[in-house]
Image (tube, grey):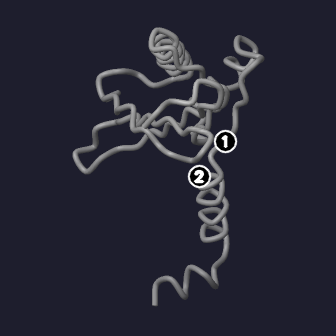
Amino acid sequence: MQIDKLSITLTYDGWKNIKKESLLGIALINLKGKMLIWGAEDLSEKQTRWPEVIKIINDLFTKFEENNIKVNCLVINSASEFMAAQLRLQTSYPNKVFIPCFAHQINLAVGDIFQYSSTIKTVAKE
């Protein structure tokens, strides 16, 4: 895939695999919607509070700059440590757009609906 230096979106998402390892997946998306999987980082041995997330993102930006890749937008999940990091990163990178992941937002909303609706809980059990 040819990297479009003017229109790269960085996406990353944290999750735990079946071995309970904490992972951070990183992908780049160009203007035409083509995705390049950049890699995954094992965060199991690291504390992933917002200061650590900021360091990870700053390190990624450095790697991208070294490879002549300009990131204009970041799409992140809505876990508290990522959102706290995003708020702080926005002041350091005012020329980048930070967007929460829509799928993660929907997942949180649907989870709240199931959590508070006794009718839905009953139907889900049946």
In-image side of 73 versus 57 (left or right) = right
Residue position marked by numbered label 2 in the rendering: 104
Please determine whether, in this image, residue 47 is positioned above or below residue 73: above
Q: Position of residue 119 (x, y in %)?
A: 64, 85
In-image side of 101 versus 60 (left or right) = right
Q: Which mark is residue 65?
A: none
Please determine whether, in this image, residue 43 is positioned above or below residue 12: above
Residue position marked by numbered label 1 in the rendering: 100
Q: How many marks?
A: 2
Closer to us: 14 or 72: 72
Question: Which element type, helix, strand or loop, lies under badge 1?
Answer: strand
Q: CA distance from mark 2 to mark 1?
A: 8 Å
Q: Position of residue 116 (x, y in %)?
A: 66, 69
Whether pointer 2 and pointer 1 mark residues with C-beta atoms closer than 8 Å, the reply is: yes
Picture residue at 61% right of the left edge, 38% below the top: 75
Indicate the amino acid at tag 1. Pro
Picture residue at 45% right of the left edge, 39% below the top: 14
Category of crowding for the residue at label 2, using alpha-carbon neighbours closer than 10 angstroms: few (below 14), some (14–19), many (at least 20): some
Q: Position of residue 40 (x, y in %)?
A: 34, 33
Picture residue at 50% right of the left edge, 45% below the top: 34
Closer to us: 26 or 105: 26
Indicate the amino acid at tag 2. His
From the image, which quarter does the N terminus lie in?
A: top left
Q: Position of residue 19 (x, y in %)?
A: 22, 45
Picture residue at 54% right of the left edge, 39% below the top: 29
